[in-house]
Image (cartoon, rainbow, N blue to C red):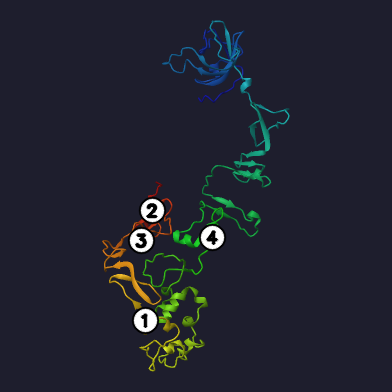
Amino acid sequence: MSDCDIKLFDRVKQKSTHAAGTGTIELNSSVAGFKDFTDVYGHSGVFFYCINDGTNFEIGSGVLLRADYDAGDSITVNQVERNVMYSSASDNSLINFATTATKEIFVTYPATHSVSIGSGIAGVTLPQKSGVAFWNCNNIIDYDNNFVWNKDSKRLGIRNSNPSYGIDIGGDGSDQSMIRASGYHVGATGIHFPSGNGSDASYVGGIQYQHFLKNQLLNANTENVFALSGVVNETIYIKKQPAGTFLAGPASGCSPPCSPDYPNFRPITLSDIPLFEEFSGVLQSQITSNLSDIGNASGAFIPLRVDQTAVSGIAQDALDASGFLRTDLTAISGIAQDALDASGALQSDLTSVSGIAQDIFDASGQFLTGSGVANYSAKWSGLKTLTSGIIFDNGSRVGINTESPTSALDINSSGIRIRTSGTPTSSSPGEVGEITWDLNYIYVCVSGNVWKRSGLSEY
């Protein structure tokens, strides 16, 4: 029997002449007009008791140890195991019943452990049917009609006398109608949102079965274009970008897999417009140098037009009636005409050519001047003059500031600078050998889209 299963029975009393001291006390005789403890309690039965010898008393919770329960144990007389709660001792401790004087032992209901309803007490309400009781003070049970249990439907109502759900909270919609907890376990029925919720008549309601995650961007390339904001990243917007850049995917000349393979903002190049790659000479130079301002381009950019028959000026002269480039350019006036001889071929002596073409020739009609060292890259030292740069290429290795490179790229310098930092994740897009940095780490791509990092520290 559980120690908490305390039972009350009326008129249960016996006498004891046992000099028990503060230990277990024996039940030695019956009392006329009363039941014995063994008449109502089994072995290990729990009850509240009072022991009184006419001078001292003791009230507590007791456990009956029956002599007939187990013939093999040492219990030969019915007895009570004592646990004091209140006594005649100044410290309410166990009474030392040391003599054989007669003592009465009976079942009682101790005041310190009694439970009462608040009848006639100000501020305490009498319980009602289906009401849920709660402690108003140590021993008095109170009741509130805002707290109701429906036994038939097994529903609990708080500020709701007729609950429709397992727990149904009423109220005025303020904090008195809310629930706060450190966590919720959502079962198979999910979270239900009623129609019209949020004062939105068009909302039809719904059920959420799975947990919600914040919106997130796919990778670093996407983060260069888009950004998120809001409590749950519910707002998506395009980031501000440098002037002269366009949202574009991989260039048309890219051989998959391309990098980056997602659209991003960048300057467009000739490879983005395959038609321009077919141009050569001055026209290609003009297209290349002015590609960032196509919207305002004129002259050399006129070939962008689909219908070119209405183009005026130099370009019109180079087109036939159908809008295609003429095969006979001898009648073309202006800059192009100056560069052609009578047969329409490029002049061998271009010293008299005016405009754009003249600008690329010197006084002798030569295109460019200058000299350099074998295997070194060329660089402009003047408007029309080339000389040797610092990059050396022996056909299999490239050296910077050295003409005896010992690896694919050999830099004769005390440092290399990567101006722009980057913080890739361990799975960001990348090719083997790519290197980047930020304030805390050096990052190296060791395999396709696989990065490793090494920490940086001050010294």
Dots 3 and 2: beta carbons under 8 Å?
no
Out of 238 and 93, give the one closest to the viewer: 238
Is residue 109 positioned above or below 419 on the image? above
Q: Amino acid at mark 3?
A: Glu
Q: Which mark is residue 431?
A: 3
Q: Mark 1 or mark 2, which is nearer the start of the sequence?
A: 1
| Residue pictured at 64% horizontal, 26% vertical | 139
Q: Amino acid at mark 2?
A: Ile
Task: Check disc 1 and report its element: helix, strand or loop.
Answer: loop
Between marks 2 and 4, how big is the CA–CA gap?
31 Å
Q: Quadrant of residue 421?
A: bottom left
Place of residue 43 in the rendered image (x, y in percent of width and height, measured from the top left): 49, 20
Q: Which residue is mark 2?
A: 442
Residue 385 relative to residue 140: left or right = left
Q: Is residue 42 visible?
A: yes
Q: Which mark is residue 367?
A: 1
Q: Nearer the viewer, mark 4 or mark 1?
A: 1
Task: Check disc 3 and report its element: helix, strand or loop.
Answer: loop
